[in-house]
Image (spheres, rainbow, N blue to C red):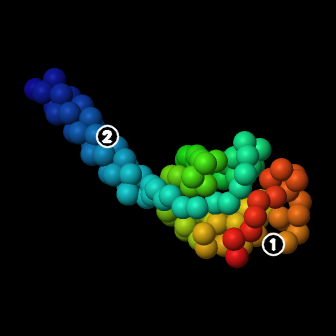
C-alpha cells in the first residue's frame, strides 16, 4: 500500500513539474518579438557599433546588413518596446527609420561611419 502511495506521489510531483515548465516556456515564447527596420550606416565598423549598442540583457539577437541597411532584432517585449530599441541605436550615433541621433552622437562616429543623413 505504501509503495502505491509513493508511486502516486512521485507521479504527481513529476506531472506538476512538467506543467510548470510548459507554462514558463509558453510565457517566454510570447514575450519574444522580432522586428526588422532600416538603420543608416556605411561599413563593418558601423555594423559592430550598431550591434554592440544592442548587446544587452533582453535583446537576444541583432544582425545589421551593410548593403540593405536593415537590422533584424529579437527582443523581450516585456523589457523593451521597439521605440526603445530605436533609441539605443540612435544613442550610438546612427539614425533609424523613425529616430534621429543627436548631432553630438553622430559627430562622435569615425569618419568612415559618418553616413549621409536621411532626415
Q: Earlier in the sequence, mark 1 or mark 2?
A: 2
Disc number for residue 17 = 2
Q: Residue placed farthest to the top in the image?
A: 3
Q: Nearer the viewer, residue 58 or 22?
A: 58
Q: Nearer the viewer, residue 62 or 46?
A: 46
Residue 27 located left or right of residue 39: left
Residue at 53%, 52% in the rendered image: 72
Query: Residue 64 at what x, y percent from top left?
Result: 61, 49
Residue 108 located left or right of residue 75: right
Q: Nearer the viewer, residue 118 or 33?
A: 118
Disc number for residue 102 = 1
Residue at 73%, 46% in the rendered image: 43
Q: Is residue 57 visible?
A: no
SS at mark 2 in the image = helix
Residue at 68%, 60% in the rendered image: 40
Q: Marks 1 and 2: which is nearer the front?
A: 1
Residue 9 located left or right of residue 28: left
Query: Residue 74 at what x, y percent from top left?
Result: 51, 52
Disc number for residue 16 = none
Amino acid at each position: 500500500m505504501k509503495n502505491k502511495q509513493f508511486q502516486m506521489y512521485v507521479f504527481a510531483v513529476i506531472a506538476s513539474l512538467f506543467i510548470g515548465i510548459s507554462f514558463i516556456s509558453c510565457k517566454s515564447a510570447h514575450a519574444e518579438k522580432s522586428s526588422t527596420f532600416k538603420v543608416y550606416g556605411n561599413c563593418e565598423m558601423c555594423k559592430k557599433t550598431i550591434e554592440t549598442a544592442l548587446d544587452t540583457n533582453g535583446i537576444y539577437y541583432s544582425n545589421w546588413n551593410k548593403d540593405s541597411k536593415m537590422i533584424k532584432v529579437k527582443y523581450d517585449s516585456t523589457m523593451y518596446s521597439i521605440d526603445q530599441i530605436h533609441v539605443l541605436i540612435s544613442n550610438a550615433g546612427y539614425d533609424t527609420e523613425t529616430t534621429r541621433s543627436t548631432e553630438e552622437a553622430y559627430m562622435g562616429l569615425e569618419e568612415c561611419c559618418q553616413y549621409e543623413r536621411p532626415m
